[in-house]
Image (tube, rainbow, N blue to C red):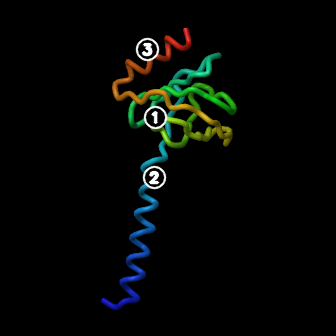
């Protein structure tokens, strides 16, 4: 294989790996519960996610949020309104019962 082909193949593989890494960190979730409370409960492929909205427009039930859904601070985008918000991902729970119980504690 020529040096040019190897270089092109290496560049293509590197860009494909970077795209896959970005796709793994970005996820979409649907808002399940959103009341007059800073916390929101989401349903995602990873399970139920409890977030606290720090700054930005509060989403409505049924909205789809896109962004990194791992514990810590994150920026999410509401697909319906295209608004971005700053949030704290409090809990990601496969079963969902703990996230729901914590939501009920924060938002009675």
Residue 102 rendering spot, x and y as whole percentages? 46, 16
Which residue shows up at 64% across the image and 36% down it? 85
Q: Is residue 61 above or below residue 17?
A: above
User: In the image, is 19 to the left or to the right of 88?
Assistant: left
- CA separation in Å, label 2 and label 3: 30 Å
Distance (Cα) linking label 1 and label 3: 17 Å
In the picture shown, does residue 105 fall above or below 18? above
Q: Earlier in the sequence, mark 1 or mark 3?
A: 1
Answer with mark 1 or mark 2, whichever residue precedes in sequence.
2
Which residue of the protein is positioned furthest toward the front in this rendering?
72
Image coordinates of residue 82 in percent, x first then y, are 67, 42
The circle drawn on residue 71 is: 1
Q: Is the N terminus in the top left, top right, bottom left or bottom right quadrant? A: bottom left
- Nearer mark to the viewer, of 1 and 3: 1
Using the image, determine if residue 24 lies above or below residue 86: below
Q: Which residue is mark 3?
A: 101
Q: Which mark, by number, is residue 23?
A: 2
């Amino acid at each position: 294989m020529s040096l040019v082909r190897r270089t092109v193949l290496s560049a293509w593989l590197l860009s494909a790996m970077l795209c896959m890494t970005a796709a793994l960190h970005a996820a979409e979730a649907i808002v399940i519960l959103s009341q007059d409370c800073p916390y929101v409960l989401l349903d995602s492929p990873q399970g139920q996610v409890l977030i606290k909205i720090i700054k930005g427009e509060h989403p409505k039930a049924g909205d789809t949020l896109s962004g990194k859904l791992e514990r810590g601070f994150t920026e999410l985008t509401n697909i319906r309104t295209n608004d971005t918000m700053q949030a704290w991902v409090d809990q990601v729970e496969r079963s969902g019962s703990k996230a729901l119980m914590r939501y009920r504690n924060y938002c009675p």
